[in-house]
Image: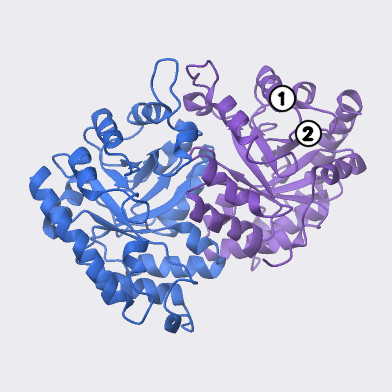
Chain colours: A blue, B purple
């Protein structure tokens, strides 16, 4: 296995959070039709956009999360933009391939190779439907993380995730309980939607020590105060993502400066919430 | 939307099955470390291998199913091999992107764009965990199909898919029942694992008219006779996949001829099973 330049355990992640007084993840949902006009003539517009966003927000962000669909939709060229973006992100910032992969064992191993070796992401989001052997291959890579879907924030989360089993447990609880046996707090996080404060509290009770990736703040409508109040633990335990609210704060030439302003607003709120609920 | 050269409804798929007396899907799980030595020096070994497999099996196969992980693991070059493979497959053969994608609505839309527009696959496998809005975007493309994970054949299928809800229904049944309202028999199939005959019968009872993609024959150990006996309906309703058993029948220069022999064995068995259980 090639040596990775990245790799962060839970304690190191919390160190970064303390240094920056932030638990902000910036979602790089970079869409050719939404980036400023003047960048579209560039030879690699997605990378050029991401580069300027990263330059503007790197001192405020703990993590970057490219949404893989946005790159995959462009074919091989999109994967090149993704690779260049990843290489541009400083090594002390956590990187998340938001890919929602998951298949039988030998196939999950190849997805792990794609994101942890061919590319050098710190972590990948994984879907739990196919169970243990679809998740474990991602956990065999030292220093790399699985971020498992537990409770998402979309309308469709009601369809299956909240179905109660005979024992009274909703499916997302089964996922949380079983999967805790597959990994540990240094190689596994959970995706927990931010639209319902009491739900976050419920998840935090089942999984007291793990980090959560919280996608639903901003465009998806969750409240940061609620997320912190119900989800924060003694090592913060939260990475809160904002995508569109930051990267498309302006669609003009000042987009990077505007992104910085929005990221800073969130970081300042996060700094207060760390004081209030964590330290 | 660019005009697709592909597109097949259920009746057309059954026509192909009758013409070829076959319901064989050949899985293109093409692995650089497993293809014959003499091909590895080729400028595009994956495509060269697939091309020869397709030439050898096109009159026996109803569908080809590239397993996307195998291409993704190679970065942008892998996506080029995939694209070339897809373009090489004759238009009257059904194509399946075995990708197990699924995310919130705007992201699923982009995955759909990747596989249905940037590439021109007939269908894609989709994971149901995130519910209705993660699946529906794939169903808005005319002539394209979703193949939804229902009951898989791997060890981990026991973890969540078989959990019984309060109403007594296992999760896979909830998936089958709810998702039938999202699509129809001309744009939706289900992945149904082939390792347990009585389970296939159970699924067929819930979903009498839909096609099933059955992955578990061969290396994963299911019996073709059982699958046909319990799963076949009046329009066949089955695509049975074999990957390793066909494409790695020989790892020498005669690999394509050896693949043809294995495909022919399955096709002959399928022909008899169609006579016995379908026509």
Q: Residue at x 57, y 45 (%)?
A: B135
Report which quarter residue A126 is drawn in: top left
The span from disc 2 to disc 1 (Cα, nearest Å) is 9 Å
Q: How many marks overall?
A: 2
Q: Which residue is mark 2?
A: B237
Does mark 1 fall on the same chain as mark 2? Answer: yes
Q: Residue at x 71, y 38 (%)?
A: B241
Residue B78 x/y as whole percent: 58, 61
Residue A104 is left or right of residue B264, and the answer is left
Q: Which residue is mark 1?
A: B204
Q: Is residue B45 visible?
A: no
Q: Is residue B156 visible?
A: yes
Element at label 1:
helix
> Would you say the residues marked 2 and 1 are in contact, meaning their CB atoms lie under 8 Å apart?
yes
Element at label 2:
loop
Q: Nearer the viewer, residue A242 or B251?
A: A242
* Sequence-first disc among 2 and 1: 1
What chain does mark 1 sit on? B
Q: Residues within 10 Å of mark 2 (few under 14, many from 20)?
A: many
Residue B230 x/y as whole percent: 75, 21
């Amino acid at each position: 296995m090639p040596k990775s330049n990245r790799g962060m355990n839970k304690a190191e992640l919390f160190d970064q959070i303390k240094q920056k007084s932030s638990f902000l993840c910036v979602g790089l949902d970079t869409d050719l039709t939404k980036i400023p006009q003047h960048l579209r003539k560039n030879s690699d517009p997605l990378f050029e956009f991401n580069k300027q966003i990263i330059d503007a927000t790197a001192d405020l962000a703990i993590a970057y999360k490219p949404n893989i669909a946005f790159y995959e939709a462009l074919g091989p060229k999109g994967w090149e933009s993704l690779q260049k973006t990843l290489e541009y992100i400083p090594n002390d910032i956590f990187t998340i391939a938001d890919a929602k992969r998951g298949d039988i064992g030998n196939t999950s191993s190849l997805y792990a190779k794609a994101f942890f070796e061919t590319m050098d992401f710190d972590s990948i989001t994984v879907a739990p439907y196919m169970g243990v052997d679809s998740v474990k291959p991602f956990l065999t890579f030292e220093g790399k993380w699985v971020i498992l879907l537990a409770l998402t924030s979309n309308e469709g989360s009601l369809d299956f995730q909240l179905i109660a089993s005979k024992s009274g447990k909703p499916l997302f609880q089964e996922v949380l309980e079983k999967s805790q046996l597959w990994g540990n707090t240094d190689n596994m996080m959970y995706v927990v939607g931010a639209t319902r404060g009491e739900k976050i509290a419920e998840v935090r009770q089942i999984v007291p020590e793990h980090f959560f990736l919280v996608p639903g703040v901003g465009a998806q409508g969750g409240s940061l105060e609620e997320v912190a109040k119900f989800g924060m633990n003694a090592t913060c335990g939260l990475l809160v993502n904002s995508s569109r609210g930051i990267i498309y704060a302006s669609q003009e030439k000042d987009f990077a400066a505007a992104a910085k302003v929005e990221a800073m607003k969130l970081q300042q709120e996060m700094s207060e919430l760390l004081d209030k609920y964590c330290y």
